[in-house]
Amino acid sequence: MHSFAKLLIILAASTYSSAYALTFPVTPNNDVVGKVITFPAKYEDTFAHYGREYDMGAYSLERANPGVDPWIPGRGTQITIPAATILPQGARNGIVINLPELRLFYFDNAHQVTVYPVGIGRAGWETPLISGATVTAKAKDPIWTVPKSILAEHEALGKPISPVVMPGKDNPLGNHAMRLSLPGYLIHGTNSSIGVGRRVTHGCIRLFPNDIEALFSVVPVGTTVHIINEPIKAGWNGNELYLEVHPTLEEYVMTPEQSKVSLVNILEREIQGRRANIDWNLVHKMMIQQTGVPQVIGTGM
């Protein structure tokens, strides 16, 4: 059986339940949260299992473990769980969604950040960038009124759907949804966890059922929402300078020269005149590999 078909069967038969809460304190002079986890795989392990266990999206695990079979990693194969990240630049309040890394950051009023994997809009249905949107409404067991564009898509595929989908197992919004001031867009759950951590939606932000339930319970109406595009991030953890590189989205692809300019600008912003000893060979390697795993590239001097 094809590995993708196996993924569908396993996820359809399982209930997502994460044992790894990614909530961290936000402290001055520290831009890095979490910790990269490594361990040898067991014979029964799969990436789907790791996703449920560590609250990780599909693409994040695949990028962090290049060349590893997501269904048969192989007993003893070294596995990397990218449970560390550099916090995005700019506003660190409310909800910040960084599209290239397929992660949502919720900054609460207790100087904490919780990090969730998300699914985002696929090609042709791209999730837009936005600054200063807000959560305008919240609904438990939401009713989905299907947009005309999605109805038309299904008609064209010969798979018509009802214009109104009631709460239940067939509702792709899952059991919780939060409406944004950006018309037509939601942050919601899912009835198909396979899409979390991938580009599969019609533009909305999709979370694992347990994650949206947790987020829904703490996010008040009026919360600010920023949707950003930061494939390259840098930041300090004490005296150590970190770099994190994700593949660019199709709609924001940069030329090699543009990537170089972007990298230099980001590092200059972080260094801001202070002396730093940087491993440029490692930087070059990271820009090529784009694993999404933050690494120390230098130290302050």
Image: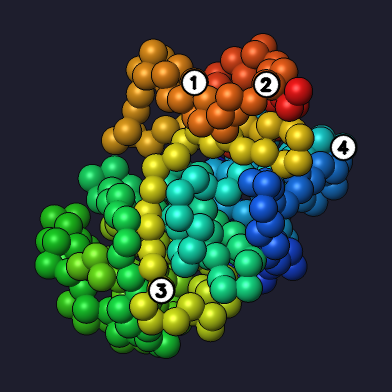
Q: Is residue 51 above or below residue 210?
A: above
Q: In this view, does 128 lie above or below 80?
A: below
Which percent across, then down, holds residue 183?
20, 67
Q: Which of marks 1 and 4 is nearer the N terminus?
A: 4
Residue situated in front as seen by the camera: 238 or 279: 238
Disc 1 from disc 3: Cα separation = 33 Å
Residue 76, numbered label: 4
Quadrant of the image occupied by residue 60: top right
Q: Between label 1 and label 4, give the one nearer the viewer.
A: 1
Residue 223, numbered label: 3
Q: Is mark 1 on a helix, strand or loop?
A: helix
Q: Between label 1 and label 2, give the one nearer the viewer.
A: 2
Question: Is residue 145 visible to the viewer in this orientation of the structure?
Answer: yes
Residue 53, numbered label: none
Disc 4 from disc 3: Cα separation = 44 Å
Q: In this view, does 180 lie above or below 79?
A: below
Q: Between label 3 and label 2, give the one nearer the viewer.
A: 2
Q: Which of marks 1 and 3 is nearer the N terminus?
A: 3
Q: Is mark 3 on a helix, strand or loop?
A: loop
Q: In this view, does 196 lie to the left or right of 74?
A: left
Read off the residue under disc 1: 264
Which percent across, then down, holds residue 142?
35, 84
Q: What element carries label 2?
A: loop
Give the residue displayed 66% in from the left and 59% down from the top.
26
Pointer 3 local density, CA inside 10 Å: few below 14, some 14–19, many at least 20 = some
Residue 275, numbered label: 2
Q: Is residue 113 left or right of residue 150?
A: right
**Which amino acid is tagged 4?**
Gly
Q: Between label 2 and label 4, give the one nearer the viewer.
A: 2
Disc 3 from disc 2: Cα separation = 38 Å
Quadrant of the image occupied by residue 272: top right
